[in-house]
Amino acid sequence: MRKPRVFFHVQHLLGIGHLRRAAILTRALREAGFEVTLASGGMPVEGIDVLQLPPASSADLKQLLDEHGKPVDEAWKARRRDALLDAFRRCAPDVLLVELFPFGRRQLRFELLPLLDSAKGKALIVCSVRDLLQPRPAREAEVLECFEHYFDRLLVHGDPRVAGFERSFGSAARLAGRVHYTGYVAEEQAAEGDAGSDEVLVSAGGGAVGGRLLEAALQARPLCALRAKTWRILAGVNFQGLDALQARAGDGVVIERFRNDFTLRLRNCVLSVSQAGYNTVVETLQARARAVLVPFAAGGEVEQTARARLLEERGLVQVVDEAVLSPATLAAAIDRAAAAPRPAPGAVDLGGAQASAALLRKWLA
């Protein structure tokens, strides 16, 4: 008897968070006995095995750029749509899993609507979203129409004790019966070890943004109670300006681009300072680290701020809004976090990957 097949579409644009979460879900699905094709439309990321579509990125989450940084044209769109549809037909899946659309990724309608048309009536069609969306009330009617026409189920990768889906999608009640909370999607715990113990760990994810946070952290060090600790600053794989940052690092400061043992160091650190993207927050909660979150809020983005504030209300983190970020405000938050207890085990549901696999198997049965 053949394994049930899943075709999973994901697109990352600014950072790599969407792809990383999809890769964790893919691993859990495979461990649960599914055969999974993970089709990625973002720029290639080393270490994540995908069916690579012609890659696209974006500097503003609006205009798509091709692999050479040029705006995509209609010929490019047609080529990518055809590649996606061909891959879907060859997979012949039992489940089509689409990350974010129609709640986001409107710029991909040129390929996703034909994909959904191809799957309708032939596969279970499921949307996968994180705990919070970027609210867009004016588009909710359009989103509902698309979802109700094509989709069978919605996986919300969050804990309703922290954030209900209605917090960022006002029309959530219209989806009653089709919304299923999975818990947050977390990697398996890292191997044991003492790497990173007694350090302050500063990170800005894998995207190109975050430079202001890293600069503020460097200047906050002498102002806070943890100034005598080693500070390890991880700039992210797409960060520009690493050399300039390293030139200003003094004794006791280590600046790197990336570490494979990040989650182990997060578990061992004295305190974490980071942005509030989904994956980083989940890793921080899993590590039960004392933490300061500085949510990304440029361009009207509110998702990270909402997540950070909800966790702060539960006593799990300290937050510094990007609008008031300075060495002094960051140092004060670091001191508050350092004086607080570590978050208790089980403060949030982190079983989202395994729960997602169990739900898909139940629905297919």
Image (cartoon, rainbow, N blue to C red):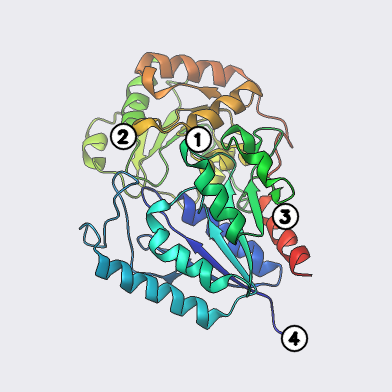
Quarter the C terminus occupies: bottom right
Q: Secondary structure at mark 4?
A: loop
Q: Is residue 132 left or right of residue 52?
A: right
What is the crowding at mark 3: few (fewer than 14 residues within 10 Å), some, or many (at least 20)? many
Find the distance from the CA under tag 2 to the CA under tag 1.
Answer: 31 Å
C-beta proximity under 8 Å, tags 4 and 3? no
Foreground of the two, 286 or 165 = 165
Pointer 4 or 1: first along the chain:
4
In this rendering, which labeled residue sits more in front, label 3 or label 2?
3
How many numbered markers are drawn? 4
- Residue at image mark 4: 1
* Kind of residue sitting beneath label 4: Met
Q: Quadrant of residue 240?
A: top left
Quarter the N terminus occupies: bottom right
- Residue at image mark 2: 211
Q: Secondary structure at mark 3?
A: helix
Pointer 2 or 1: first along the chain:
1
- Residue at image mark 1: 137
Pointer 4 or 3: first along the chain:
4
- Residue at image mark 3: 355
**What x and y, as percent, mark residue 56?**
32, 60
Find the distance from the CA under tag 4 to the CA under tag 3.
Answer: 23 Å
Find the distance from the CA under tag 4 to the CA under tag 1.
Answer: 46 Å
* Kind of residue sitting beneath label 1: Pro
Taking the spot 45% from the left edge, 28% from the top edge, the residue there is 294
Placement of 321 over or under 358, stated as above or below: above
Q: Secondary structure at mark 2?
A: helix
* Kind of residue sitting beneath label 3: Ala
